[in-house]
Image (spheres, grey):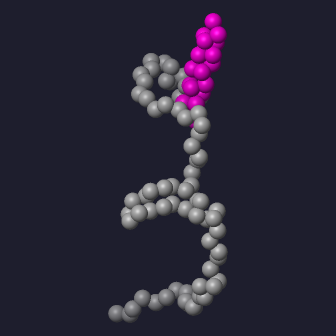
Amino acid sequence: MNGKKRSTATESVSPDDAPELTDAFFEQADEYRGDKLVRRGRGRPPSAARKVLLSVRYSPEVVEYFRATGEGWQARMDEALREYVTRHRAA
């Protein structure tokens, strides 16, 4: 049996040719301690106006209506409820 053949030639690379690691690189990097992820550097930054996660039951008609509006239906549902609160808070 033949050993594995390399598909591309390997050549020696000088460590001096490596790109410089800047502070921006480390800001975006994930930090691990062993196998455990300690800090994720990428992704959406935390919002100042965080939303609350909870479980709510709605009537099927309401859910069907908003789902039929397509992608982002939960955000539209949230906006409709916020409009309701704004109108009724002023009264």
Of 49 and 5, the residue lying toward us = 49
Q: Quadrant of the N terminus?
A: bottom left
Queried whether the magenta region covers residue 85, the answer comes back as yes
Of 40 and 11, the residue lying toward us = 40
- Answer whether residue 38 is visible to the viewer in this image: yes
Q: Quadrant of residue 79?
A: top right
Q: Quadrant of the C terminus?
A: top right
Q: Residue furthest top?
A: 91
Q: How many marks?
A: 0
In the rendered image, residue 75, in percent from the top left (x then y), is placed at: 58, 31
Of 46 and 80, the residue lying toward us = 46
Queried whether the magenta region covers residue 76, the answer comes back as yes
Where 12 sits versus 71, above or below?
A: below
**Which residue is located at x 64 percent, y 68 percent?**
22
Q: Quadrant of residue 17?
A: bottom right
In the rendered image, residue 74, in percent from the top left (x then y), is placed at: 54, 30
Instruction: Magenta stretch: give its range.
Output: 70-91
Where 32 sits versus 11, above or below?
A: above
Of 13 and 15, the residue lying toward us = 15
**Which residue is located at x 48 percent, y 18 percent?**
61
In the rendered image, residue 14, in percent from the top left (x then y), is placed at: 60, 88
Q: Is residue 56 left or right of residue 48?
A: left
